[in-house]
Image (cartoon, grey):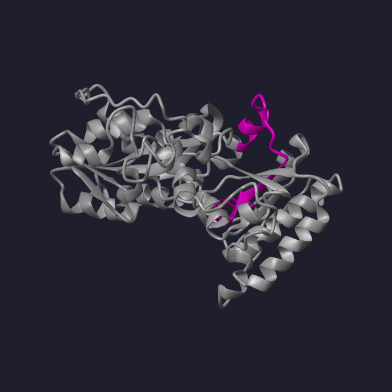
Amino acid sequence: MKYVDEFRDTRAARRLVDDIRRTATRRWVLMEVCGGQTHSLLRHGIEEELRETVELIHGPGCPVCVTPAEDIDFAQQLALREDVLLTSFGDMLRVPGTRESLLDVRAAGGQVRIVYSPLDAVALAQKHPDRQVVFFAVGFETTAPATALAVRQAEQLGLENFSLLVSHVRVQPAMESILRSPGNRVEGFLAAGHVCTITGFDSYVDFVREFRVPVVVTGFEPVDLLEGIRECVRQLESGRAEVTNCYARSVRREGNRHALVAVEQVYRIADVPWRGLGVIPSGGLRLRPEYARFDARRRFEDTGCEEELPVITTPDCPAAEVLAGRMRPSDCPQFGSRCTPDSPLGAPMVSSEGACAAYFRYRTPAVDASQPAGASQPEATR
């Protein structure tokens, strides 16, 4: 691929929309589990354009949003220690735990620094041998290889002052949890292309066989997403359930073997909590025993991380319902009034990949859902 323009071509997008409408004999329910895809579906008007043909449910595709509040609380406590420098990606700073956010703690004097790579945290540990440098490792399978490499580099350098607070989660177990949940309505999945770039899609073969739902790997541009939706609809209309790769320019069946080997060497699969979904079997990663010395939880347990922080409760925030795909952000009574990106009540409005943030940014009051399809022409199909 030399250019991205071909995947934003309005005529190609219009043909795909028309083809989806011709193919569908009923309104199918599809879920994407990727915050980037959620934003693209709204930004380019795809959800609105297909609302009479396909119901798009936005799953827990924002890794920052599903990071357990307890992990954020622990990170805050670490940041308040005089001997600790807590490092993190910038989008973690405003996400609330059960208490304050890391940004609030930094404003109160906590040592929190934004980095752009876990290797930056390793460099800080080299530069500040008198400080314990902790990297808050969050994200799907996409970011796990980089944090694994950071651990291996710290080991090679013999660093005793570097550790990870690991909160990596795995996408497929969350999809399984959603399909097993009471009241599930999902009939097909758009699989996250960036995750499959690392993991490949072989594991979805057994998933499809067990649950009898199509899984279509898609990218993030309008044509990518529309091709994925069309393939899902075609399978559902013909009674098929298969794994299909509609993002072949980036995703291979076997994934990225070098990245997978790095992850397998450093991490083990574990049952972990997801914010809004509870503990998901095999839903995340933890450091292997041979790398336990880099585990911040072990390093700092029972060492005074008991600082009291003001408790912030958000009883009016149904973030769990949004993350599980049971509620649209715009159906929340707080959406756009008490809850905005400037004054968020919950994680999905804070993160740049959150569904609430996407709805706030791209769904305008001028859009009337009662209008017939085609009454307005969103960006992707004008």
Nearest the eye: 292 or 44: 44
Nearest the eye: 324 or 298: 324
User: Image point 47% across, 37% down: which residue?
Assistant: 285
Residue 195 image offset from top left, x and y in percent: 55, 51
Question: Residue 281 vs residue 55: left or right?
Answer: left
Question: Residue 212 vs residue 39: left or right?
Answer: right
Q: From the viewer's perspective, is residue 217 above or below residue 248?
A: above
Q: How many marks?
A: 0
Residue 99 image offset from top left, x and y in percent: 29, 28
Q: From the viewer's perspective, is residue 209 above or below residue 42?
A: above
* Quarter of the picture holding the C terminus: bottom right
* Quarter of the picture holding the N terminus: bottom right
Q: Write down the region rendered in magenta.
A: 175-200
Instruction: Tell me, yes or no, if residue 89 can be seen here.
Output: no
Question: Residue 35 vs residue 91: left or right?
Answer: right
Nearest the eye: 80 or 259: 80
On whether residue 237 falls in the magenta region, the answer is: no
User: Image point 19% across, 41% down: which residue?
Assistant: 106
On whether residue 192 falls in the magenta region, the answer is: yes
Q: Quadrant of residue 338?
A: top left
Residue 91 image offset from top left, x and y in percent: 35, 48
Residue 307 image offset from top left, x and y in percent: 19, 24
Question: Residue 204 vs residue 89: left or right?
Answer: right
Instruction: Tell me, yes or no, if residue 13 can be seen here.
Output: yes
Q: Quadrant of residue 181?
A: top right
User: Image point 80% across, 45% down: which residue?
Assistant: 26
Q: Residue furthest bottom?
A: 2
Nearest the eye: 269 or 249: 249
